[in-house]
Image (cartoon, rainbow, N blue to C red):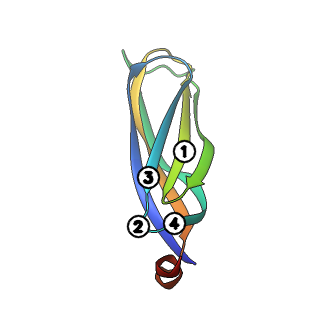
Amino acid sequence: MAVKFEEETVVFERTTGPVSRNEEVTFERRVEKANAAIKSFKLDYVGGVRESDIVEVGITRVEPSHTTVEFTVTVNYSGGEFTGEVVVLVIAEIEERERALNS
């Protein structure tokens, strides 16, 4: 197995409340196992800063399928309307080239 990394930026346009986005990344060979981590995030309250705001960001699903890894990013910003982005790092164990060619 070889370990590969892909980075995906998930953009959230003006929205409110909890929001989930399904995304995917593709690798050059079949994915055996995968996981994802939040690399960074930036959420901006539309209208200014409020000290009592709570931000929750998580990856709630990671599913490999052939050469693709699908994942779900969930964001909840208690302050009201917001915009922002979440950068996700997808880590995958992929087939070695020799095995992929002989399949």
Sequence-wise, the earlier of marks 1 and 4 is: 4
Image location (x, y in percent) of residue 3: 53, 73
The answer to which quarter of the image holds residue 64 is: bottom right
Q: Which residue sits at x=55%, y=22%?
A: 53
Q: Residues within 10 Å of mark 3 (few under 14, many from 20)?
A: some
Secondary structure, mark 4, is: loop
- The residue wearing badge 1 is 71
Q: Residues within 10 Å of mark 4 (few under 14, many from 20)?
A: many
Secondary structure, mark 2, is: loop
Distance (Cα) linking label 1 and label 3: 9 Å
What is the residue that sits farthest to the bottom in this orientation?
A: 98
Q: Residues within 10 Å of mark 2 (few under 14, many from 20)?
A: few
Sequence-wise, the earlier of marks 2 and 1 is: 2
Distance (Cα) linking label 2 and label 1: 18 Å
Distance (Cα) linking label 4 and label 3: 12 Å
- The residue wearing badge 2 is 28
- The residue wearing badge 3 is 25
Q: Which residue sits at x=56%, y=54%?
A: 65
What is the residue that sits farthest to the front in this orientation?
A: 103
Tell me the number on the disc at residue 30.
Answer: 4
Badge 2 amino acid: Glu
**Is 64 in front, or is 74?**
64
Contact check, label 1 and label 4, Cβ < 8 Å: no
**Is 100 in front, or is 54?**
100
Image location (x, y in percent) of residue 54: 58, 26
